[in-house]
Image: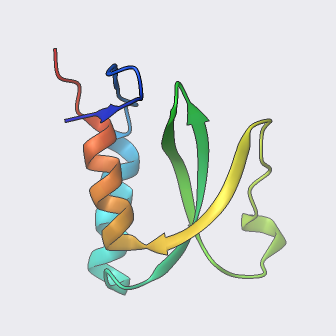
């Protein structure tokens, strides 16, 4: 399905490995678990790049790159967005 930007272009971002990891976390901890998600605006759409459990462990903290920011969302919602952005329609 991909995301569609304001110009009507389909934007996708490969994330198969991230989807597989998230499915395992959902199976173990539940779809209502809130995650910290790294996102970035690219070509007019929000791209979901990575996620982590919310905790205060400095060993697992992300270092944001330029243009990235954090949001919080449930595992189920994140999975839906990752699956959508992973699909490329021609």
- Residue drawn 34% across the image and 67% down it: 77
Quadrant assignment for the C terminus: top left
Q: Is residue 7 above or below residue 54?
A: above
Q: Is residue 78 above or below residue 11?
A: below
Quadrant assignment for the N terminus: top left
Q: Position of residue 2 (x, y in %)?
A: 27, 34
Q: Is residue 46 left or right of residue 83?
A: right
Q: Is residue 85 above or below residue 56?
A: above
Q: Position of residue 81 (x, y in %)?
A: 34, 53
Q: Is residue 55 left or right of residue 28?
A: right
Task: In the displayed orientation, state which residue is furthest to the top.
Answer: 90
89 or 20: which is nearer to us?
89
Q: Quadrant of residue 36?
A: bottom right
Q: Position of residue 83 (x, y in %)?
A: 26, 47
- Residue drawn 42% across the image and 28% down it: 6
Q: Position of residue 57 (x, y in %)?
A: 78, 77
11 or 38: which is nearer to us?
11
46 or 61: which is nearer to us?
46
- Residue drawn 80% across the image and 50% down it: 63
- Residue drawn 61% across the image and 64% down it: 71
Q: How many marks?
A: 0
């Amino acid at each position: 399905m991909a995301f569609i930007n304001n110009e009507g272009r389909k934007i996708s971002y490969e994330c198969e490995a991230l989807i597989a990891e998230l499915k395992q976390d959902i199976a173990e901890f539940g779809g209502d678990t809130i995650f910290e998600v790294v996102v970035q605006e690219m070509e007019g759409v929000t791209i979901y790049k990575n996620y982590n459990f919310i905790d205060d462990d400095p060993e697992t903290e992300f270092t944001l790159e330029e243009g990235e920011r954090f949001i919080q969302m449930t595992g189920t919602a994140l999975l839906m967005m990752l699956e959508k952005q992973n699909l490329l329609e021609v």
